[in-house]
Image (spheres, grey):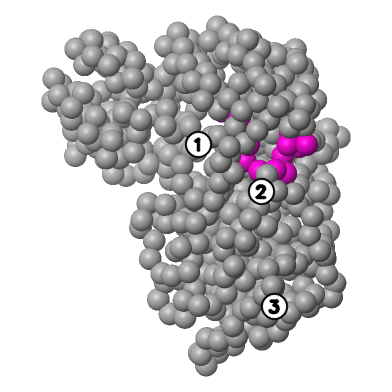
Amino acid sequence: MAGFDLPVRTPFEPHPTRPRTHMHDRETDIMRVALLSGFGPTCKNDVYFDGTLFGDAATAAAVGRSYFADRGGFALSDLSFVSGGLRHALLRPLRDAVPHLTTMTLEAILEAAGIQQIHIDTTDIWNGMAHPPAGQIDAVLVSTSYIWDMSTLGRALNFARQVADGRPVVLGGQYANIRFRQILARHPDIHCILRGDAEQALPALLIAIRDHKDLHGIPNLVYSTADGRVVATSRHEIRFEDWPAPRITGARPAIPYESMRGCPFTCGFCSFPFASPHWRYRTAERIARDWATYAEGNGTSLINAMDSTFTVPPRRMEALLDLLPSIGISWEAYSRANYLKDTRQMDRLAAGGCRTLSIGFESMHDDVLAAMSKKVTAAQNRRAFDLLRGGEIGFRCSFMVGYPGETPEAYRATSDFLVSEYEGHFKLHVFGMTDEAMPVWADRARFGLEVGDEDDPDFDWRHDGMDATTATRLNHDTIDRVRRRNEHAVLHMWQDRYQRYLLPHLSRQDNLKVEKIVERIAMLPRDHPDPATGMAAFDRLLDAAARFGITRTDPATHCGRDLITD
C-alpha cells in the first residue's frame, strides 16, 4: 500500500484544472450546497445473516414464505404485545434516532456561515431512493466518515456528479482523509479534499468557490494539479475545547455529542487518531453546560457521546460525574475496560445518568492485546465484565478475531469466554486492514502482514497467524456457538433499527431474554436447515415468547400509535 509523502505548499497554488462556470446564475449571492452524509451501506458482517429473517427485506420475505410454509408463512413483524389496552408490534421501527454526528456538525457549520444546504442521506443512495434535488446547486459536499472501500466511494461519487452537474465536488471525512492520494488519482474531477477540522476551513473554501478565487490561504486542503501532483495546504486546528458545540433548533429527544478530537491511544487496528493527531478535549464544566443547554432548549433526554473514549482523562470524568446528577440527563458512551475499577465507580456512573457503555475488549489473550497496543489486559477486561454484569448500566462489549499475529489457538481464549462465560450484548468483528494509516501497517514485516486487493483490503489480507477467510470462518463459528449454547449472551447487530426496549415495561434483563428469542426465531434457517426440525423449534420459541406476553398476530391489527420507550 502506498505511502503518504507529498509536497506541502503555503501559500497555495491555484487550482488550474477546475472550470469557473455555472456559478451564481441566480440573482442572489447566497450559496446553496448539497450535503451527502450518513451511515455506510451495510455492516461488514451482514453476510452472516444471509438466508435468514435478519437478511434484507427481499430475502426475509422469501424466507418467511418458503421456510415457514407449514405455518402459513411468517415475518418478524407478526410478533406483538399489548400495552395500555393497545396491541403494538414487538419490533417497532426506530423513532427519534440519535442524529448522525457528522451531518449535524456540518449542518451547524453551514448554517453559521449563512450557506443554504440540502441534506441527502447516504442511506437513500445505498438503497436507490436518492434523487438529485431541484434547483441549482453551487457545490456538492461528500462525507466519507462511514465509507471504507473504493467501491462504496464510487457509488457515492456517481450520485454526487449527478447532483453537481459540473460544479465542484468536495470530499471530507475519515476515508478521504486517509486515502486522499488514491482517491485523487482515480477521480481527478474532485475539486479538493478537506482534511481535519472543517469549522473554519469549509466556509472559507466555499467562499473561494463562490467568488472564483484560488485556494490561497485556506488550510486543511488536498488537491491535484493539472500535471498530476498532489498538493497539500497547511494544517490548522481549531481550539476545540473553546469551540461551541453545534447549536440546533427544535425538539431533539436524542443528541450526539463530541467531547474530544483525536485520541490519546494508538491501538494498532485504529487509524482514527491519524485524522486528528492532536488530542484535544472539552472540560467537564463545558460538557455539563452543553448538555444542560440541549436539555433545556431542545428537550433532549439522551446524549450519545461519540468519542472514541469518553471516560478519559479520568480526572475530567470524575469532575463530570459530580455535575451530571443535577442535570438529570441520560447518556451513552464508549469507554475502556481499565477505567472500570470498583462498585463505587459504577454507582457514580449510574447516578450520573449513564445508561449504556460500549467497551472494546477485543481479545481475552494478553499476547494479542499486547500486539494491538491496547494498553489493557485480559484481567482488566474480566474485572470490567464482572462489574458490568452485576449492575444496572447496560453494556455492549466488542471483540475481534484475526488481528495480525493472532493464531486460531490464541483466539480460542476469546471464543471460549464468549461461549462459556459472557452475558449481555456482544459484538464480534473480523479484523480489517482498512487503510495504511493504521499503526499495525508499520509492523507489517513483524507480522508477515500482506494485503491482496487494495480496493477492498478488509476482506483480502493474510499474516503469519491466519488469513481473512479463516478469520471470517472463526467469526461465524463463534457467533453460532454463542447463540446456540449461551442463554445469556445476545449478538448486537440487528437491534439498532428498532425502538428500545422491545418491551418497555420490562427490565433490561428480561428484554435481553426477549431479544434472544427473536434472534433464535430469525436464525432458524441457519440453525435448523431442515424446516421440519425448524418448525418444532419455532413452536417452542413462540411458547417462550408467550411467557412475556408476546403473540403472533396479523400486523393489520397492530396499533400505529407511537409507544414511548426512551
User: Looking at the image, which residue is at 49% across and 56% down?
Assistant: 154
Displayed quadrant of residue 401? top right
Indicate whether residue 430 is drawn in magenta. yes
Q: Nearer the viewer, mark 3 or mark 1?
A: 3
Where is residue 458 drawn, in percent x and y?
57, 37
Residue 490 position in % (x across, y down): 48, 20
Q: Which residue is mark 1?
A: 44
Rendered position, 133 above or below 182: below
Residue neighbourhood size for the residue with mark 2, other residues' Cα within 10 Å, grouped as few (<14), some (14–19), many (≥20): many
- Per the rendering, the mark at residue 15 is 3
- Residue displayed at 70% across by 48% down: 2
Q: Which residues are magenta?
A: 425-442
Is residue 403 a member of the stretch shown in magenta? no
Could you tell whether 234 is left or right of 247 in the image?
right
Q: Image point 58% across, 54% down: which residue?
A: 144
* Secondary structure under the numbered disc 2 in the rendered image: strand
Q: Nearer the viewer, residue 318 or 15?
A: 15
Q: Which of disc 2 and disc 3 is earlier in sequence?
A: 3
What label does residue 257 carry, if any? 2
Q: Are the two marked residues, 1 and 2, in contact with CB atoms closer than 8 angstroms? A: no
Residue at image point 63% right, 51% down: 175
Could you tell which of marks 3 and 1 lies nearer the N-terminus?
A: 3
The amino acid type of the residue labelled 1 equals: Lys
Tell me the kind of residue under disc 3: His
The answer to whether residue 218 is seen in the rendering is yes
Image vertical order of residue 253 relative to residue 501, above or below: below
Look at discs 1 and 2 and give the one toward the viewer: 1
Inter-mark Cα distance, 3 to 1: 37 Å
